Image (cartoon, rainbow, N blue to C red):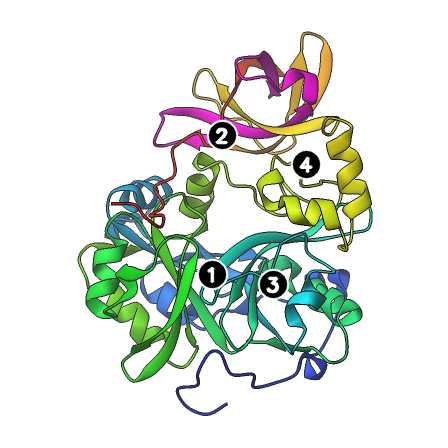
Amino acid sequence: MAKGPDVRALPRHAGDLPMSDTEEFEEQPPEKLPLDAWHREHGARMVPFAGYEMPIQYAKEAGGGIVAEHDWTRTHASLFDVSHMGQLAVAGDNAAGELEKLLPASLGNLAEGQMRYSFLLTEAGGIIDDLIVTNTGPHLALVVNGACKWDDIAHLREHLDDDVTLTHYDDFALLALQGPEAVDVLDALIPGVARLTFMRAGLFQWNGQHVWISRAGYTGEDGFEISIHETHVRALADALVADDRVKPAGLGARDSLRLEAGLPLYGHDLDLDTDPVSAGLGFALPKSRREKGGFAGHAATMARLEDGGSASRRVGLALEGRLPAREGAKVFSGNALVGTVTSGGFSPTLGHPIAMAMIESEQATDGTKLEIEVRSKRLPARVVPLPFVPHKYVRKGAS
């Protein structure tokens, strides 16, 4: 690929990619991010995650630590490295139609620069992965979860028509700048990004390079994702943290923020045994697609909807005390086992433990009192609305 490529170009066909199944992928040693040395220089503690060595937190003496990074994101702006995620493109005259065979999203009416949350589904309605689709103009861009990307690529290659080109941008990094001051920081560096609103994206220039920027994120705060070629990402990271309002943040704060925002994480709150209805993600099943169908899992999904929902539902739980409930903890109503915690931890913003769980639908009413088993003790909990902490997205038409 030439120096300073347009991120909307299609440099390689996915048929050139080495493929491996999930077991082989997990047995391989973790790969390094393009910013691996940068993270270590900034005091990051690196851990294996989704096939990569990832920063979980930064040195406390430099103002890091999970809670400090969490709080800084809520009040200023934090820089997260999410380059482990898969950046894909689907191009061709019928790219939207082909993807609509696999996703329940409406893509034919997706305006240029518009983003949409969706899923890859099995015929049984199980979630293979959740993802973001963006109409870039020349193609439809997909951002998929890092741990799933090779399986996603294999699934897409198997089911997309030969006239559609699938490209993996494996030489592009992805940064997320999140927090209330993110817009001022980034607009000063790359003028014009402030015009974007939530779930909108566009092509910009920085330091002579093309960068693709979207305004979304997975922290519940306002923020941006920046896709840039790996050869230029260090200079961009340096430019961002040179602003006193920006500090690097790791996986720990990202997880606590997305939990407070009530956002599911694939492999924990979502998996092949979870469907969009039980996961509480019905907003991503538009009426037109429900009626017309034509996507994998349509019959199973409609059966759940027509039966009044799934037998279980994803809910938020607020716990008393200070002891958090972690993934896998059992949820009880009296002596009856009614569900399992899928994500949990202590909420720095709220000052008490919170969790998301899949529980029996009849127990899912807000205010229902339950108990969670932690260290052989039953901790009182109650069902509460999601998100735990209100989202702060800047939507179109907002003042």
User: Mark 2 or mark 4: which comes first in sequence?
Assistant: 4
268 on left or right of 192: right
Which residue in the structure is indicated by mark 3?
A: 108
| Label disc, if present, on residue 33 of the rendered structure | none
Read off the magenta span: 346-374
Q: Is residue 2 visible?
A: yes
Instruction: Specify whether residue 106 is painted magenta.
Output: no
Query: Closest to the observer: 72 or 136?
Result: 136
Which residue in the structure is indicated by mark 4?
A: 277
Relative image position of residue 306 (x, y in whole percent): 76, 31
Which residue in the structure is indicated by mark 1?
A: 114
Relative image position of residue 107 (x, y in whole percent): 60, 60
Relative image position of residue 59 (x, y in whole percent): 32, 52
Q: Residue at x 66, y 83 (%)?
A: 13
Q: CA distance from mark 2 to mark 4?
A: 15 Å
Residue at disc 1, secondary structure:
loop
Taking 11 as reference, is 40 above or below it? Answer: above
Residue type marked 4: Val
Which residue in the structure is indicated by mark 2?
A: 386
